[in-house]
Image (tube, helix red, strand yellow):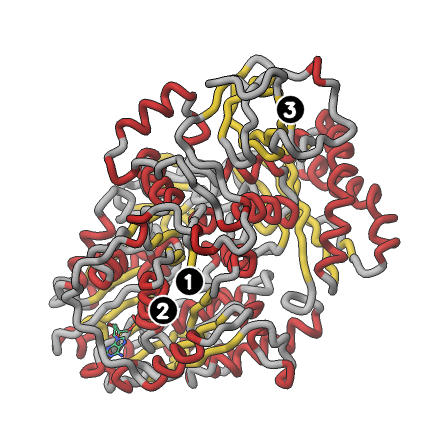
Amino acid sequence: MPLSCSSPHRIGVVIEAPQHSGLWGALDYLCDQALPPGTLVRVPLGRRVVTGVVWRGADECVPEDVPEAVTLKAVTEVLEGLPPLPASWRQLVKFASAYYQRSLGEMALMVLPPELRQLDAVQWARRLKSLDKAVAPPAPPKRKRAKDQAGGEAEASPLPEAAATPVASQVVLPELTDQQRTALDVLTQPADKPFLLWGSTGSGKTEVYLRQAQRALDEGRQVLMMVPEINLTPQLEARVAERFAGRRIVSLHSGLTPAQRLRNWLMAHYGHADLILGTRLSVFTPLPRLGLIVVDEEHDPSYKQQDGARYSARDLAVYRARLEGVPVILGSATPSLESWYNALPEAEGGAGRYVRLAMPARVGDGDMPAVRVLDLSRVPKGTMGQEPPPLALELQDAIALRVEYKEQSLVLLNRRGYAPVLHCSDCGWKSGCPHCSAWRVFHKVDRTLRCHHCGFSERVPRACPDCGNTDIHPVGRGTERLEEQLIEAFPQARVGRIDADVTRHKGALEARLADVHAGEVDVLVGTQMVAKGHDFRRITLVAAVNPDAALFASDFRAAERQFALLLQAAGRAGRDADVAGHSEMWVQTWHPTHPLYQALRRYDYADFAAQQLKEREMAGLPPYASLAMLRAEGKTQEAAQAFLSEAVQAVQHLADELGSVTLYPAVPTPVQRVANVERAQLMIESPQRPALQRFLTQAQPIWLDVAQKNRRSGLIRWAVDVDPLSI
Ligand code: ADP
Ligand code: ZN
Ligand code: ZN
């Protein structure tokens, strides 16, 4: 690398330092090049050399409290050939790190492809060479970013070939429905607000995304289309690829190999890829020509990262769209109550921050399946020691009829395994996990007792470990057992199952889905995995056999999630207008009059949302308040709670000064012990988001101190979760 100046430059670099290190900002290094911000470098840290991102360039002012230049170390090497990460990317990372209370370096490095932060300069150069031509970096000369130049829009596209002409498309586009046309009309008008596309399942939302994407692509822009992890099916990829034949489409999700992920990310960053289809992690992809962001199934919990930096990709997508001045479409049949409230006009008691686009009717005017709420007290009870049959007689008859007519049924049970617990009727022994406060699930296929929390697995004992009784039996029912029972109940039917257990191996999910699409399954048993997204054409009956647990869960979002799941499951039936007329959604419940089922019966999301919003407002819960959760893990429950209590005491004065921040008592988490680690949490609430933010920012350094002091007394880990999804 050539020396551009006789004296070395002083730059600020962020590295992957966890929040607990107390290192929040950039570290200073010397470099003989004037590296621009966003450049990836390798820098010495203690005895290691780590990857970092230049955050403060040589020409930017140095903060006053940094060490004298003599004590600074030099940058080890630069990852050459990688265009600097743009200012918009750095701003997004900076916002995310501040909002979600993580260190800048952790956030910045975490959102890069894993390979990028592991390779040294030599390996990187080799890697670049091995990637095929499609990934060749854009030519370095006269490369200017629009952001750096006032009015430099014309040069925003770094590559002439970026907007490659697609081969003439052979696809025959469907005639738009009136609703789709109306939505698309609104979408053409410039709006500085996010759009909430609220459309029934099968109303043609995806078609709207695709049309809007087409517009952006035609303007030479890139499209970021985000979907929940589980929805990134080959079917969707194929549909997008077919629609945009000739365009460069890449996917970004955690299922890719590190090399694929790096390649696809580079394609996006270089501006080669036109459309990025990705899960939550794709929200951070640098896109020089970004023109549209779509967040499909925006209510889906998988948009929230659940460990490390707990960010919400949906919320960051909204922030990013505003930052980069591009439209964002959030789509769902059952929007999150936060988005719904944001899209509700002020006149209706909402925030009026989003534009709502409604598409209530299904394409082809197919009706949603008729909902049949079935009183479970009518299901015959099992005789002593025997499990009751899984289905009420009417439901069983209805499925038998489908089998006869060569139509498919989907039986939904959100619990995998054979039975959730084994039980000894002599002494009362149950198959608890020795490491967790949870039962171990009986899996019949390999005769194991498996803990779904820590993974601990053992062969099923021949006899009760406590009293030697050989008559130990499964209690309750998971998908594995339901499948077995349905095979028995419908001897003439082909019964299939899709859940996390049978789709563990690569390609297994695709194969099983293909069987369903090919009509080789009559009755499909599945968890929520099959309730979402799939465009099944022959299913005319969906049944939820045991959905009641959510009605009484301690988590205030349980009802919202359950409603979304049931409605989405219902949407799997009658997707062909031909069969929509006699499609049915069955719900077996002990609480047939519950308002959730009553709203479901009418497919009245708006009514359900209104009920929920009223409850949330009274209880001071989101979207009427902002929450954060302080979580702690300890060797003992006392240790975890002691830290939380001290943490509260140490910041109570901050909360008092701010006035509107409430700290709740520390409590054990719902599953209190996992893998021998005790967990506790406390909720922090404020009706004003900025107040909560200010509080958390000021509290963090204090909590760091408290944590240091608590290390010896058994505290293992702690973290702040902003906008927690589950409580
Ligand atoms: P959603 O995303 O709202 O569930 P999709 O966009 O997947 O709905 O549409 C459901 C089905 O209807 C798909 O098979 C799709 O190809 C088809 N479809 C969508 N829009 C139209 C239209 N305007 N005319 C005919 N078929 C359509
Ligand atoms: Zn026993
Ligand atoms: Zn366990």
Mark 2 or 3 closer to N-term? 3
Residue 419 in sight = no
Q: Where in the figure is residue 327, as x and y percent of width and height? A: 47, 65
Tell me the quarter of the picture where residue 28 sits.
top right
How packed mark 3 is, by other alpha carbons closer than 10 Å (few <14, some 14-19, many 20 or more), is: many
Q: Of helix, strand and loop, which one carries label 2?
A: helix
Check disc 3 and report the residue beneath it: 10
Q: Which residue sits at x=47%, y=24%?
A: 78
Is mark 1 in CB contact (under 8 Å) with mark 2? Answer: yes
Q: Of helix, strand and loop, which one carries label 3?
A: strand
| On screen, residue 47 above or below 480 | above
Picture disc at residue 691: none
The amino acid on which the numbered mark 3 sits, given as a three-letter code, is Arg
Of the pair 677 and 221, the residue shown nearer to us: 221
Q: Which residue sits at x=57%, y=29%?
A: 15
Is mark 2 in CB contact (under 8 Å) with mark 3? Answer: no
Check disc 1 and report the residue beneath it: 294
* Label 2 vs label 3, nearer the camera: 3
Image position of 641 (left or right of 259): right
The amino acid on which the numbered mark 1 sits, given as a three-letter code, is Val
Check disc 2 and report the residue beneath it: 212
